[in-house]
Image (tube, grey):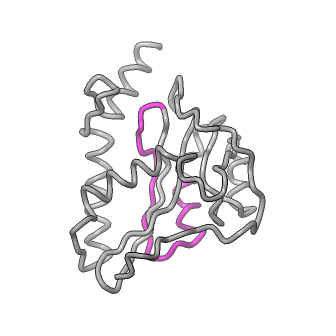
Amino acid sequence: MDSARRYNSYRGTVGRIAERDIKRDFQADAPYQKIVTDVTEIQLNDHNKAYLTAFVDLYAGEVLSYHLAETPTLALVMNSLKALSKHRGAIIHSDQGFHYQTPAFINMLKDFGMTQSMSRKATPVDNAPIESFFHILKANIVHHKRYESFHDFKMVVDAFINYYNNHRIKQKHNGLSPIRYRQLTTEAVS
């Protein structure tokens, strides 16, 4: 395994770079206002890698959509973005990876009535919540583990994200899971 080289989806300016609308304001007053996304590479064993993209809502920390693939293609991100079509008006914040600069991604955001926001180049702290989610996921299901197949790993990712959304409590949400926090706080407003 080449542990010194980290995956980097930045390929220079290959499309349009969006403004940094979020500006590290990671607070949201309601669900689906601000959503962060990124792609991470995961070493499964000595020969195989997987790439995970996730879209995480900043209101409750809920993983709204994710997709896993064996290659970091545009389809990886687009398949996950399609699941967000009903969240019109959201700001989608990412890094400057090539996926997010493409006309296909930009146009789908426009079609969904969403605003695009991007971190500054080489500034992971500008997208800290998604980096934090990937760190938690890797600490729980990747570090010091090997997976014989992509399929085996996908089953573990699916189970972990279900656990993360529905059962993993957050102290800042009074000991509630992301989905339960969203449900209780939005019911109280209704």
Left or right relative to 11: residue 34: left
Viewport quadrant of the N terminus: bottom left
Camera-nearest residue between 11 and 74: 11
Residue 19 placement, left or right of 166: right
Most distant residue in the bottom direction: 47
The residue sitting at the left extreme is: 145
Is 10 in front, or is 181? Answer: 10
Q: Residue at x 45, y 51 (%)?
A: 131
In this picture, residue 16 sits left or right of residue 116: right
Coordinates of residue 67 in the picture (x, y in percent): 45, 61
Compare residues 59 and 105 and report the one nearer the observer: 59
* In this view, 79 is above or below 18: below
Compared with 2, 121 (above or below) is above
Does the magenta run of residues contain 69?
yes
Location of residue 112 (image quadrant): top right
Q: Is residue 141 magenta?
A: no
Rendered location of residue 9, percent (x, y): 58, 68
* Picture coordinates of residue 37, whole percent (x, y): 53, 51
The residue stretch that appears in magenta: 59-81
